[in-house]
Image (spheres, rainbow, N blue to C red):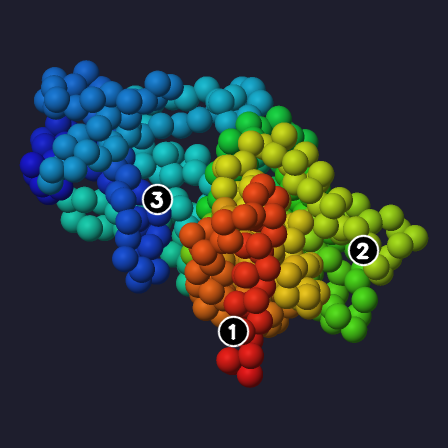
Amino acid sequence: MNEMEFSQKIDDLGGTLYIVGGWVRDKIRGVIPKDKDFVICHVKEDDFKQNFPKAKKVGKSFPVYLVKIEDKECEVAFARKERKTGIGYTGFSIEYDEKVTIEEDLYRRDTTMNSIAYRMRDGKIIDPYKGREDIEKKCIKAVSHHFKEDPVRALRAARQACELNFRINEDTVNLMRACREEIKSEPQERIFNELQRALKTKKPSIFFRSLVKADLLEILFPEIYALIGKTQPVAFHPEGDAFEHTMEIVDLVADMTDDVAVRFAGLVHDLGKGVTPKEMLPHHYGHEEKGLAVLKAWNKRMTLPKKWLQGGLFVIKEHMRAARLGKVGKIVDFLLIVEKNPLGFAGFNCVILADSKSLPYYLADYHSYLQKIHSVSMKNCPANLKGKAIGDWIRNEQIKLFKQNIEVEA
């Protein structure tokens, strides 16, 4: 069964099939649309089940079915209305029957650009809340005051701002601000999901700046909020305080890699600056060690992926050492440590390059230096050496080869 055959069967039942949400928005934007979300109006659920016996019901609070269309299982929901009755995203009373119109279904959605429907039978666009106009203006605008009833919509608006590079309408920012208290009780999994999606965008800083504007950053990501106002030596950081520096770094890292764990490491590399005592500013002595405790506390509140946590901790602890090392022995040791870090050399180098604007020679050409270091073999170790002496011999040989490599390049 293809889409038009499915649409015709819904028509035959006296109903109408629509595509809604992101697919319609992206089609209007001229971007290749992704997965389709289907909505059915004016059909009784019993009639649907009778005519589509193989459809699998997956919705618990309201009817959502998986229907095989062109060899792909697609989500098909029945049009519904919502009424706020409790706290959070589960605190809704839902009404769904054949009387609910597509306009009513679209009204319960978050923003105007996501409240547009495409009627399958003839391709007509249903746009009761002027979503196309807002797409043209590159503006994220709430459909109604009901926006604030699901507090995670505030996070979603911030994330969509950086995904699409759209601005958020001022009235919508105020509605985001109105979510401040209720969002405190939202599951951390929902907050993490929006963070992850924001870090996948080309310019993640827009997400955090949008949350600052709506007075939500302090509630959602207090570790990042704490960086605001933490001044830095102007000679080294003309961009501004530790927050401005962090926003610059996370965007620079995003330009260099798609690895979200590396982007997160860029975001958290200077977390320790957020707890620098006021009297120490603009200096941040020991912020590397302090930052470890801050990230561990973040992980305690919001369980982070293992690679994110381990990579972030490594970058926080080691990012300042890279440019300071001069002695060959310490450089050799450092290369061997970096080699084992969860982000790999490529990931670690992205953060160092973004932060320092250049790479130390040994990181820029790490392949060559590692090859020399690893060419040292125990097979060549003098037979009379035992225990610690073997390790000392290996390290001395590695240092010797490293120096030879420098001399050859010179």
Residue 100: quadrant of the picture: top left
The amino acid beneath tag 2 is: His
**Of tags 1 and 3, which is closer to the observer?**
1
Q: Is residue 367 found left or right of 186 in the rendered image? A: left
Q: From what the image shows, is residue 106 above or below residue 285?
A: above
Depth check: 390 or 303 in front? 390
Which residue is drawn at the image coordinates 49% and 61% (left, top)?
A: 373
Q: Which tag, 1 or 3, sits closer to the chain's start?
A: 3
Residue 38, x across and y down, in percent: 25, 37
Separation (CA) of disc 1 from disc 2: 36 Å
Near-viewer residue (58 or 95): 58
Tell me the residue at 69%/59% (across/down).
Answer: 320
Q: CA distance from mark 3 to mark 2?
A: 46 Å
Which residue ends up furthest to the bottom in the rendered image?
A: 410
Question: Which residue lies under the disc numbered 3?
Answer: 21
Residue at numbered disc 2: 284
Q: For the residue marked with disc 3, what is the amino acid?
A: Gly
Label 3 sits on a secondary structure element that is loop
Name the residue that disc number 1 marks. 405
Ranked by sequence position, the earlier of labels 3 and 2 is: 3
Secondary structure beneath dot 2 equals loop
